Image (cartoon, rainbow, N blue to C red):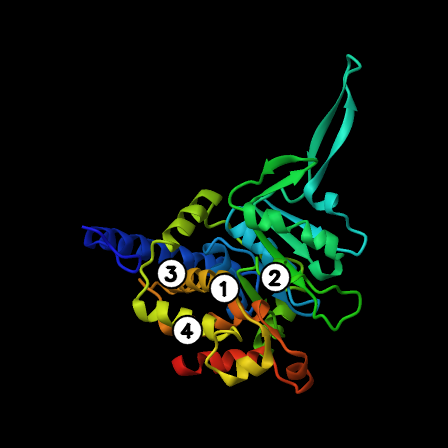
Amino acid sequence: MTTTPTQQAPADSAALAEHIEELGDKLARVRESIGQVIFGQQEVVDQTLITLLAGGHALLIGVPGLAKTRLVETLGAVFGLEDKRVQCTPDLMPADILGSEVLEEGESGRRSFRFIPGPVFCQLLMADEINRASPRTQSALLQAMQEHRITVAGHGHDLPRPFHVLATQNPLEQEGTYPLPEAQLDRFLLEIDVGYPELDAERRILLETTGPEQANAEAVMDANELMEVQRLVRRVPVGESVVEAILAIVRNGRPVTSDLEEVRSQVAWGPGPRASQALMLAVRARALIDGRFSPSVEDVVHLAGPVLRHRMALSFAARADGVTLDHIIAHLTAPYG
C-alpha cells in the first residue's frame, strides 16, 4: 500500500501518535525549565522552540536588554547543546567566526598548515547583534547555515550536528547597523520579534534577577534526542487544507502571481519556495509543541508573519505611504482568519 505525502499508513499513524504523546510530556518539561529563567515572552520562547524542532535558524529582533542572549544560553542548557557566542562588531572578520589555517613548524623543521576551528564549530551558535557586523562577515555564515559545512582555504569542514544559528538583531534605525543581505535573511526559518515584557513579567524579572541567587535552567534533552524530534517533525501528517493554505498565502505574496491588488502595487519582491518549506516545517513543529497530531490552518495563519516578514520587501512608494509588511501579511491571511 502506498501513501501520499499528506497521509500516513495506519500502523505508522499509531506509532506516530504514541511518539507525539511522549514528546508532549517532554516538551512541557522543556517549557517549564525555560520558564525558570525567562519570564513572560511565552510567544518568543515558543517560536524559538519551533525553530529548533524544525531544524532551522532564527533571527531575534528587539532592542537591547530584552533577554535575547539569556534565552539562547538557556536553550543550549535545556537541550544539552554545545553553545558558543560571537559578539558581532564592525571590525569582526570572517576568520573570527569560521576559523583559519596557520603555518606551523614541527620538531623536524617541516612546515605545514593546521586548521584552527572558529566558534562556528558548535551545535548552537549565537551571533549577537549580527547586524553590527559588516556585510562581508555576515555573508561568512551563509554556507554554514545552508550546508552545515564551511570552506576555508579550499578545504571543506563539516560542522557538528545538530547545528543552529540563533542571531539577535537591533532595530535597523539604531546607529551602527548594517542590513542583512536578502540571501542570508532567507536562511532564517523565522524572524522573531522580541517586545517589551508585560507588567507582571517585568515585576518578576525585577524581583528574581536582583537577589543573591538566580535560577538556572535544567537539561531536559540532549543533542541526539533533539535530532530524533527533528526527524519526527518531518513525519507529522499534514492535511490538504493546510497545504493549500500555505501555497495560497506564499504565492499570493509574490507580485507576479498574486491575486491581491495590495501585493501587486505595494510589494517589490515576495517569498520564494523556501518560505513554503519553512512554513510547512514550522506548523508541524507548532502542532507537536501543543501536543496535537497534525497542524491546522490556524497554525499557518499564526506563523505566516514570522516566516514571511523577512522574505518580502515593500516598494518605495508603499514605505513612503506608511504601509508595513504586517499589513500585507494580514491581507494574505484574511481568508483563513
Q: Secondary structure at mark 1?
A: helix
Which residue type carries mark 3? Leu
* Image quarter in which the C terminus is found: bottom left
Residue at 70 percent across and 54 percent down: it is: 138
Which residue type carries mark 4? Ala
Q: Secondary structure at mark 4?
A: helix
Percent x, y for residue 183? 62, 59
Residue at 48 percent across and 74 percent down: it is: 257
Q: Are marks 1 and 4 in contact (CB under 8 Å)?
A: no
How many circles with numbers are drawn on the protein? Answer: 4
Residue 250 visible: yes
Q: Which mark is residue 288?
A: 3
Residue at 66 percent across and 54 percent down: it is: 127
CA–CA distance in space, label 4 to label 2: 22 Å
Residue designated by label 1: 275
Q: Mark 1 or mark 2, which has the lower sequence index?
A: 2
Q: Mark 1 or mark 4, which has the lower sequence index?
A: 4
